[in-house]
Image (tube, rainbow, N blue to C red):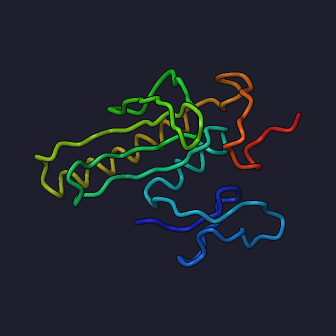
C-alpha cells in the first residue's frame, strides 16, 4: 500500500496530495507516493545521501514478487541486505547509471509464507539502511547531475 509524504521532511499527507508542494512553509519538498512498508528505510537512505527513485516492498498477489529500491545514482555498496542483489544499468530517461537492490521470492510459497518473507525483507532493508555510512563518507562527494532534485544538490 502506498502513502503520500514529502521527500524532504517526510511528513505524511492524505492520499490526494501527490505532486503538491509540501505544506510546511519552510520545506521545499514535493509530496510523493511511496510504499508504506519501506517508508522508514527510504527516509534513512535519502537522509544519508542515497537518493531513491522508486521502491516496492512486494505483494503476495504478484506473479514474480520482489522487494526493491532504485537509487538516483549508481552505487557500489560494500554490503547489501540479506538475500538482496545489486543491479547497475544505464537509464536513458535519467541519462545516468542507476543502481537497484532487490530480493526476489519463490512463487512456490504460500501467501502467508510469502507475506512473512516480505516483512523480513523490509526489516533487513531497514537494518541495512540504518547501518550504512552517509554517502559522502562512503564514497566522497559525487557531483550530482541535473536529474537530481534541487534539494539533493550540495552547496559548494
Q: Out of 95 and 70, give the one closest to the viewer.
A: 95
x, y percent for residue 77: 52, 25
x, y percent for residue 94: 58, 41
Image quarter where the C terminus lies is top right
Q: Is residue 22 left or right of residue 44?
A: right
| Residue reaching furthest to the right | 156
Q: Is residue 84 above or below residue 152?
A: above
Q: Out of 62 and 83, give the one closest to the viewer.
A: 62
Q: Is residue 147 above or below residue 25?
A: above
x, y percent for residue 40: 54, 53
Q: Residue at image x 72%, y 35%?
A: 144
Image quarter where the N terminus lies is bottom left
Q: Residue at image x 45%, y 65%?
A: 2
Q: Is residue 155 left or right of residue 93?
A: right
Corner quadrant of residue 143 = top right
Q: Residue at image x 86%, y 38%?
A: 155
Q: Is residue 34 above or below residue 102?
A: below
Q: Is residue 142 left or right of residue 112?
A: right
Corner quadrant of residue 46 = top right
Amino acid at each position: 500500500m502506498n502513502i503520500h509524504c514529502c521527500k524532504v521532511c517526510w511528513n505524511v499527507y492524505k492520499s490526494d496530495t501527490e505532486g503538491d508542494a509540501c505544506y510546511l512553509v519552510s520545506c521545499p519538498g514535493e509530496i510523493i507516493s511511496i510504499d508504506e512498508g519501506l517508508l522508514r528505510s527510504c527516509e534513512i537512505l535519502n537522509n544519508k545521501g542515497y537518493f531513491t527513485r522508486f521502491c516496492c516492498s512486494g505483494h503476495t498477489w504478484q506473479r514474480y514478487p520482489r522487494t526493491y529500491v532504485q537509487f538516483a545514482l549508481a552505487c557500489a555498496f560494500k554490503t547489501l541486505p540479506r538475500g538482496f542483489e545489486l543491479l547497475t544499468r544505464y537509464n536513458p530517461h535519467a541519462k545516468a547509471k542507476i543502481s537497484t537492490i532487490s530480493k526476489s521470492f519463490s512463487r512456490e510459497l504460500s501467501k502467508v509464507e510469502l507475506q512473512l518473507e516480505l516483512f523480513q525483507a523490509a526489516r533487513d532493508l531497514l537494518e541495512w539502511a540504518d547501518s550504512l555510512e552517509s554517502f559522502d563518507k562512503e564514497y566522497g562527494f559525487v557531483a550530482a547531475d541535473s536529474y537530481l532534485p534541487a534539494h539533493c544538490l550540495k552547496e559548494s
